[in-house]
Image (cartoon, helix red, strand yellow):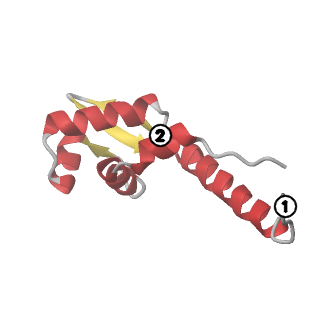
Amino acid sequence: MMTSVDTDLIRVLGDPLRLRIVTLLAREMLCTTHLVEETGAKQTNLSNHLRVLREAGVVETEPCGRFTYYKLCPDVIASVAGQFADLAESARTAAENKRACP
């Protein structure tokens, strides 16, 4: 059984600021203003990271008056977690396998 992990998604989530954004959005929907306050990032930098997260399908937007709220897409996070769980299970069952040296 070949187990693979979505490397593009791992790259997206591997950035410290994006991971911080994801962690914050796991608790509640937030607008850009809230995220600037919580992370201390500049608005333009934050907007670029939110765009990457949106394009990767990690977050969705919800308009609210003149503000845009961001919410986490839990299925995407669950999918990555499942890929790692599959990888761990594969390692458990392969623990007895050892390829002979030539």
Q: Is residue 62 visible?
A: no
**Amino acid type at mark 1:** Arg
Residue 27 lies, with reference to residue 59, above or below; the image says below
Say what secondary structure mark 1 lies in: loop
Residues under numbered marks 2 and 1 in contact, where contact means CB atoms less than 8 Å apart = no
Q: Is residue 2 above or below residue 52?
A: below
Going 82% across and 62% down the picture, which residue do you hit? 101
For the residue pair 81 and 36, the one nearer the viewer reads as 81
Q: Is residue 101 left or right of residue 40?
A: right
Residue 71 in which image quadrant: top left
User: Looking at the image, which residue is at 84% across and 61% down?
Assistant: 99
Q: Residues within 10 Å of mark 1 (few under 14, many from 20)?
A: few
Where the C terminus falls, by quadrant?
bottom right
The residue shown at (42%, 55%) is 26
Distance from disc 2 to disc 1, alpha carbons, whole Å, reads 38 Å
Q: Residue at x 51, y 37 (%)?
A: 8
Percent from the top left, x then y, of residue 94?
Answer: 83, 65
Q: Which residue is mark 2?
A: 58
Is 16 positioned to the left or the right of 55 in the image? left
Residue bearing mark 1: 99
Q: 69 or 39, which lies in front?
A: 39
